[in-house]
Amino acid sequence: MATKATQDNLSPDDKDTQQEFNKLVNMSASELKKWLSTDESKSVGQKKDGAEESTGHHSGELIVDLLNQKKGDVSEDDLHQMKRVVSYIKRHLAQRPAEVEGSNWAYSLKNWGHDPTKK
């Protein structure tokens, strides 16, 4: 089991990661969980070595767990996942297509907890 840290003993970089994660993940745990159950969610993303679930879909499940956990308690594994999420969302936002609504691009981002149609 990974060691939990409190907000008081997080490095400045770790605090920045948490802030970016909280800014970029604009879906609630319940919104994301509902999205992950849709066919659209399951239709996008890369699957490793014949896996049934895409990397992004699996990440979405981990994000739901992060959003549901007690604020302030974070493990090294949690921070690693938050960094992956931040990196993915930033990278994909830079590749915005002309038509967002209903695109695989939007579906993929939503699997990672970011709804690009939200204002």
Image (tube, grey):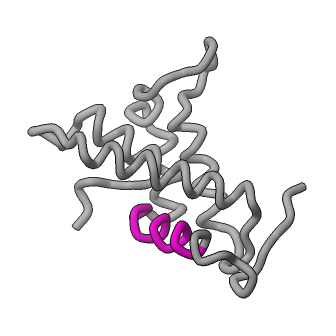
**Residue at coordinates 69% horizontally, 69% vertically from top-left?**
69
Q: Name, please, the residue furthest toward the right.
A: 1
Q: Name, please, the residue furthest toward the left.
A: 98
- Magenta part of the protein: which range? 15-26
**Residue at coordinates 44% horizontally, 61% vertically from top-left?**
25
Residue 35 in view (yes/no): no
Is residue 77 toward the left or the right of residue 89 in the image? right
Magenta: main secondary structure: helix
Q: Name, please, the residue furthest toward the top.
A: 50
How many labels were placed on the picture? 0
Residue 46 in view (yes/no): yes
- Of residues 115 and 16, the one nearer the viewer is 16
Which quadrant of the structure image shows residue 44? top left
- Of residues 38 and 79, the one nearer the viewer is 79
**Residue at coordinates 20% horizontally, 43% vertically from top-left?**
96
Q: Is residue 108 above or below residue 6?
A: above
Image quadrant where one finds the C terminus: bottom left
- Of residues 67 and 10, the one nearer the viewer is 10
Q: Name, please, the residue furthest toward the front.
A: 12
Q: Position of residue 18 (x, y in %)?
A: 55, 70
Is residue 112 toward the left or the right of residue 58 in the image? left
Q: Is residue 21 above or below residue 104?
A: below
Q: Position of residue 97 (x, y in %)?
A: 16, 38
Which quadrant of the structure image shows residue 77? bottom right
Query: Does the magenta run of residues contain 21?
Result: yes
Q: Position of residue 26 (x, y in %)?
A: 39, 64
Q: Is residue 77 above or below residue 12?
A: above
Is residue 81 toward the left or the right of residue 89 in the image? right
Query: Does the magenta run of residues contain 48?
Result: no
